Image: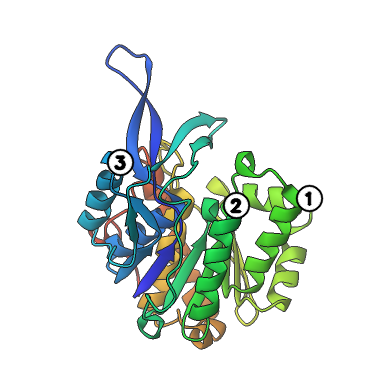
Amino acid sequence: MLIACGDALIDFVPTRNTEGREALMPAVGGSCLNVAIGMARLGAPAGFVGGISTDLFGRMIADHVTASNVDISLATRSDRQTTLAFVRIVAGESHYAFYDAETATRNWTYRRGSIPFASVEAVHVGSTTLVNDQGAAETEALIADARASSMISFDPNCRPNLVSDKPAYLARMAEFAGSADLIKMSDVDFAYLFGDEPYHRRASTLLEQGPSLIVITRGNNGAIAWHAGAGLIEVAAPKVEVADTIGAGDSFQAALLFALHKQGRIARPQLKAIGADELRRSLSFAANCAGLTCTRPGADPPWSSEISWNW
């Protein structure tokens, strides 16, 4: 199984009503939940770990992920409210206002011994769960138990408007990066975390700290990756008509993990030994999946029947 651990919420996505006025449409979201959905829709055995409410929105989330073939038996259900995120598109980028006090996601706790890590190939973590102290601490405990048998994937998916102490947040993200085998981030995340530092310099530093693969996505400029053995790989983004970019990075992440899994390259030793051609195929597939996601509103990653791969 491949599992994603983190946030599950409802995005209120901008749209227009029949009169042409601005309106908001509720859609199931949350970066890590999106990753779990993306992996499952492509055909990987995928599960989600995190807090899901039993309220109206929580039932929407549970119904949606179950319909996408995600195993939520490892999730924690509670009567706390669901996290809500209101989205506004500014210059092509999604900006969020979060309502996350005392929610099911924010109050999730890791139950030691509850996850059979021996049968889990990869664990993906990141996003808003890592902003608050409790979520970060619980995720660190999960990683500590998982690392012996599972590859660790990390996407900071930064949300600056939730960060009250940036130096502390940067230190926390550095710690998670140091425990990961695969790090993926957007160019926007990179700028927030590392400023104007050249991509290649930071990638070299990160690789020296233990991860095998560093990937930076750059919107319509495609993605670039660094691997200690396979070297530098760059892939183009498909040309599509963009509805919005919500969930595109999560779709990329899910598709990359799926592709590595499909090629037998997701376990830590196999990821370290991946060849350039295999990695390029994986990245191109991920870019195509992200592109398809951009053609429809909200986080709606593709099903296996909608996308093809060449391996």
Q: How is the image coloured?
A: rainbow
Whole-number angstrom distance, CA of label 2 to CA of label 3: 22 Å
From this viewpoint, is residue 7 visible? yes
Position of the N terminus by quadrant: bottom left
Assign the C terminus to one quadrant of the image: bottom left
Circles 2 and 3, Cβ within 8 Å, touching? The answer is no
Q: Secondary structure at mark 3?
A: helix
Question: Residue at image x 56%, y 52%?
Answer: 157
Q: As drawn, is 1 to the left or to the right of 172?
A: left
Q: Amino acid at mark 1?
A: Asp
| Residue behind mark 2 | 131
Depth check, front residue: 55 or 4: 55
In the image, what residue occupies the spot 30% across and 41% down? Answer: 57
Is 72 displayed left or right of 251 in the figure?
left
- Residue 226 in the image: state x and y as whole percent: 64, 70
Between residues 294 and 78, which one lies in front from this camera angle?
78
37 w.r.t. 89: above or below? below
Going by the numbered disc 3, the residue's amino acid type is Phe
Q: CA distance from mark 1 to mark 3?
A: 40 Å
Dot 1: few (<14), some (14–19), or many (≥20) neighbours within 10 Å?
Answer: few
Please tell me which of labels 1 and 3 falls first in the chain.
Answer: 3
Q: Mark 1 — residue?
A: 196
Observer-nearest residue: 140 or 197?
Answer: 140
Q: Nearer the viewer, mark 2 or mark 1?
A: 2
User: Residue 161 location in percent, x, y?
Assistant: 62, 38
Q: Which mark is residue 57?
A: 3
Q: Secondary structure at mark 2?
A: loop
